[in-house]
Image (cartoon, helix red, strand yellow):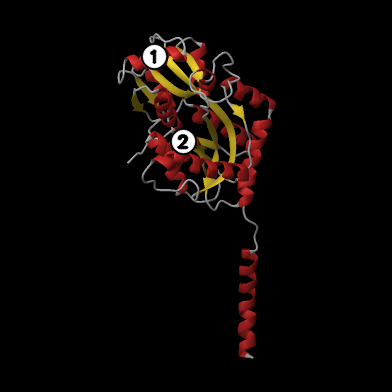
Amino acid sequence: MKLRRNLLVLAPAALACAMATAQPAPVYPNKPIKIVVPFAPGGTTDVLARLLAHRMTAAWGQPVIVENKPGVGGTIGASMVAKSPPDGYTLLLGTVHHTIAQAVYKTLPYSFERDFAPVGVIAMVPNVVVVNTAVSAKTIGDFISLARSQPGKLNYGTAGAGTAHHLIGEMFKKRAAVDFVHVPYKGSGPAVTDLLGGQVQVMFDTVASALPHVKAGKTRALAVTTARRSSALPDVPTLSETVLPGFDVGTWFGIVAPRGTPTPVVQKIYGEIDRMAKAPDIRRQLLELGAEPIGSTPSQMSAQIKAELSAYEVLARQVHVVIE
């Protein structure tokens, strides 16, 4: 009898616990979201993050904040996101720089393949060889001749050591048999500022970042680094068609989340990326910026990252880029 009374007393508590356990999870998102940009303001990564943040805010009714965490070739911001809770409220605007960093840095506090959940690639942007207008070269052939005549005298700026800008620069040096000095910055924005000021003479910048200054006549575009010409700079030849056959490197930009982020959350974020890539007004805006809209799925992005990690390990060895 006593046992029965005890069971009757405990039953309501057990039922309450079961009901609490059965409560549905809060609908995502129910609080502000942060997109970490691992470079300084002003570059392509920053521009694309703000475009996506604006669309997500409008679609979901929750603030989506862009936070710049520049430094060490994009790895400081990546490390911060890798350690964040896997709940979809802290995201990384990842780029090809991160697959390259995995190949060139001797040690990193994270693995780009193991510690992140791919969500979707927003856009791919060709890179372009741009020079300060004080540089006498009018063509990429002229520039190579100039660099060969002044070994070690010219500087090239990048978004940081171990970024695509850096690896493309080293590839160019090796293939063109030239010698100039690498000057790393905390993002494309500050590097472009010094290119305009003449502190560096050349950059292998993304078309999206370089385009406004090329159009304004403040810098000169000599060649595009992808196999196909850029739709934003159709009159600028490629390296492949001019002086370096087979040269083909571009820069992708996309969203990754901490590994373990629930699949429904990943899919919801991807859905907004896909809609953004397909929206006529956004496509037009991206193309005008020099970016090619992509909108790839999480599985497609995962396969791309895996392939790149392998390819860039080989390439980093070939061009002897190792960062302590």
Mark 2 element type: helix
Task: Count residues near mark 1 (Cα–Cα under 10 Å), then give few for <14, some for 14-19, many for 20+.
Answer: some
Choose top left, top right, bottom left or bottom right for residue 20.
Answer: bottom right
Please report the residue visible at 62 percent of the width from the left and 46 percent of the height from the top.
299
Mark 1 element type: helix
Closest to the observer, 318 or 52:
318
Report the disc number at residue 207.
Answer: none
Q: Position of residue 31 (x, y in %)?
A: 56, 44
Q: Position of residue 311 (x, y in %)?
A: 49, 40
Please report the residue visible at 50 percent of the width from the left and 36 percent of the height from the top.
96
- Which amino acid, mark 2? His
Question: Which residue bears the numbered disc 1?
Answer: 145
Label whose residue precedes the other's in the sequence (2 or 1): 2
Report the disc number at residue 97.
Answer: 2
When the figure is inspected, residue 104 is found, relative to residue 237, above or below; the finding is below
Choose top left, top right, bottom left or bottom right for residue 54.
Answer: top right
Choose top left, top right, bottom left or bottom right for residue 134.
Answer: top left
Closest to the observer, 316 or 23:
316
- Which amino acid, mark 1? Ser
Quarter in which the N terminus is drawn: bottom right
